[in-house]
Amino acid sequence: MMERMMRRVSGTVWVRISGDTARFVNILVRSGIFPLEMQAEGEELLLLIRARQFRKLHGIKLRTHTRVKLVTRSGLPFALRRILKRPGIPVGIVLAAALYLWLSGFYWCVELVGEAPYSKTEILSAAAESGVYIGVRKKEVDLPMSANRFLRSLPDISWASFNSDGCRVTLDFRPAVKKEQPVDKTGAYDVIARRDGVVKKIAAQGGTVIVDVNAAVKAGQTLVSGVALIKDPWDPEKVVRHLLSHARAEILAETRHTFSASCPLKEETMREVSVEERKVLRVLGLKFPISLKGARSEPKSIVKKIQLSVLGTDLPVWLEIQRCVRTEPKTVAYTTGQAQRRALEKLRVLQKNYLGETGRILTEEITFSEKAGVVYAVSHCTVEEDIAVEVPMGGTG
Amino acid sequence: MGETADKLRYSMTGGSVRTEILGREKLIIEGCDGIIAYTAQEIGFRCGRRQVWVHGEGLRMICIDTDSAVLGGRIGEVCFK
């Protein structure tokens, strides 16, 4: 096999000898040219010799008065000569090799392995912020450092590692296991009022209830004490022991609140003038605009990305759809009625955020006023809410 | 001149020719200093004052050196003259 390879590399030629073939061969061998193969064709002889030895046949031909004819030639030197006649081919080969080597210096695939309470987009975005993304130069990336940065950006991931294999980076990660904090049942706690109000309903799970229903309480007043009184069963008036416990209770009370919201009569907004869509094909980090509509380089643009994937593997080829919205300022004027409605809507949002799921409005008085081009909506309302808050005994919460 | 030197060298070895036949397909000859004729039916070797002729069918020279040769094919007979 090595001999065959050497023949191909050095090049060989078949020559046809006619005349005194025996003498020709004798002199050929004594000259140090050993034929690789010999074939007899009637009175003629076919010799296979190395390409560089062909020139030496001329002297032997003259000496022996034989006829030497080149039949075929094969091997690398002749192939190179044919290739060099067309310079585009070697130039193309060199450019392709250079392109391949250059592209090998980038990461073209980021593969995710593992489960985490984040979407794929969030994880890839965090990986990109830590320095690992499709199209990044290998020399610019420090994988262990990037793994540390990645962990800091996503707190619900307990372990992560970037591993590279050629132009592919695999991100392995594991979710953090959250331990539920047990309810701290140690220590003595009181339940105090969060704000002033009139107690309407008491539901205590621990401790000693101090206040009665329909009693008026102040903010900070103890409602349920963490001191449990153990009484003599045969003498209810006699306290046998005092036990410190963790008081828990849900206490609904009527409280008063004032909410306010405003809406100006004239407002500056941005109006959409035109919407343009521009499609760009990204291949190996290079941009190729597809649509002829040129979107202006506006700061506001929404990008949608459609990734090409084959057999579940994302390729470094995707289509970007940029939606550019051109806006211009516009002054919007409201009538007094419209401004009042808008202010009332804001008021309702404030009330909902404050009351949450448990609170409700019992009575409400809404007033509107206008001052300096702004309409104000004020709501004085009576609200039913849970005013209980647990504090360590002796503390103020 | 080269041919004369080969004859001298051959004579200094005592003029011995070594012929080795492997079955019917291969023949190795040592002590020759050239070929006389080469066809597919017969190949003649010059060994000093002697000649060695190989007759057969499909004879071909596998390799040839200054004082030895290997030939293959269907060997019929080897004559020493």
Image (spheres, rainbow, N blue to C red):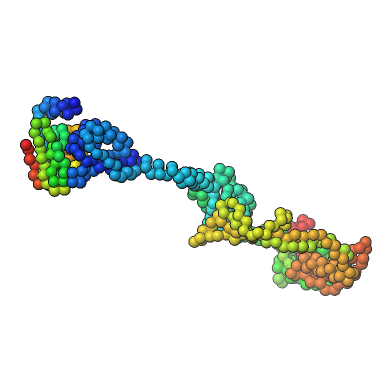
Residue A54 place in picture, x, y as percent: 30, 37
Q: Is residue A190 above or below residue B45?
A: below
Residue B45 place in picture, x, y as percent: 13, 37
Residue at left 67%, top 59%?
Answer: A293
- In the image, farthest residue toward the bottom: A362
Placement of the N terminus of chain B among the 4 image quadrants = top left
Q: Is residue B1 above or below residue A393?
A: above
Query: B44 or A294: which is nearer to us?
Result: B44
Q: Is residue A279 above or below residue B60?
A: below
Placement of the C terminus of chain B among the 4 image quadrants = top left
Residue at left 61%, top 51%?
Answer: A128
Query: A297 or A63: which is nearer to us?
Result: A63
Query: A206 or B73: which is nearer to us?
Result: B73
Q: Quadrant of residue A138?
A: top right
Residue at left 12%, top 33%?
Answer: B47
Q: Quadrant of residue A325?
A: bottom right
Residue A76 place in picture, x, y as percent: 36, 42
Q: Is residue A72 visible?
A: yes
